[in-house]
Amino acid sequence: EVNVGGELTLESVVAQISAKVAELCGHEEGDVAEPLSSFGLTSISVAELGAFIQAQFNRQVSALELMTTASAQSLAEMIVHGAESAEEGETVAETDGSADVSPQPVHRVRTRRSPFANRLEDHFPIQA
């Protein structure tokens, strides 16, 4: 499936992501620690990069992350170390530091609102 017959290494993942970014942005690869946003990703190329990472490494990365903080290096670390953790039987959540808070059940209350009460005029009547 992923790199058939080989281990995922940081170097190989960084190289694949960097090559994809260079292909999408139309210029040579830059510093792997530099945010991908600095290479001029468009919303379309962000979507394509996200789909590439999903298909190639079976990892989901938010578009917001790709457009702001993500670098080829940070993505590769998430992909490689996340994969190692999953193999060791840990959950990926434990590798990002968010697992120290025990998950609480979420209780959502649905309220039905009339579509007519959502207009600005319903809350602030216009004075004639």
Image (cartoon, grey):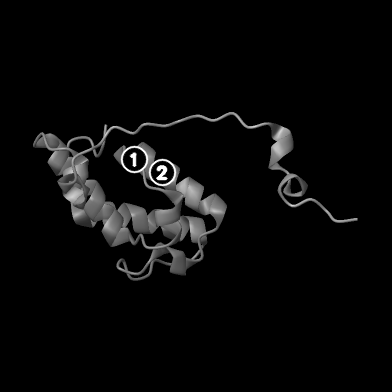
The image shows residue 70, relative to residue 58, as above or below, that is: below
Q: Which residue is mark 1?
A: 56
Left/right of residue 7 with respect to residue 36 in the rendered view: left
Residue 84 coordinates in the image, percent (x, y): 14, 42
State yes or no: discs 2 and 1 in contact (Cβ < 8 Å): yes
Residue extending furthest left?
A: 88
For badge 1, the amino acid type reads Gln
Residue 87 coordinates in the image, percent (x, y): 12, 35
* Number of residues whose C-alpha sits closer than 10 Å to that of mark 1, classed few (under 14), some (14–19) or many (20 or more): some
Residue shown at 27% from the left, 59% from the top:
74
Residue 32 coordinates in the image, percent (x, y): 31, 66
> 126 or 62: which is nearer to us?
126
Residue shown at 13% from the left, 42% from the top:
85
Residue 71 seen anywhere in this rendered image of the structure: yes
Residue shown at 56% from the left, 50% from the top:
44
Q: Secondary structure at mark 2?
A: helix
Left/right of residue 98 with respect to residue 44 in the rendered view: left
Left/right of residue 46 with respect to residue 53 in the rendered view: right
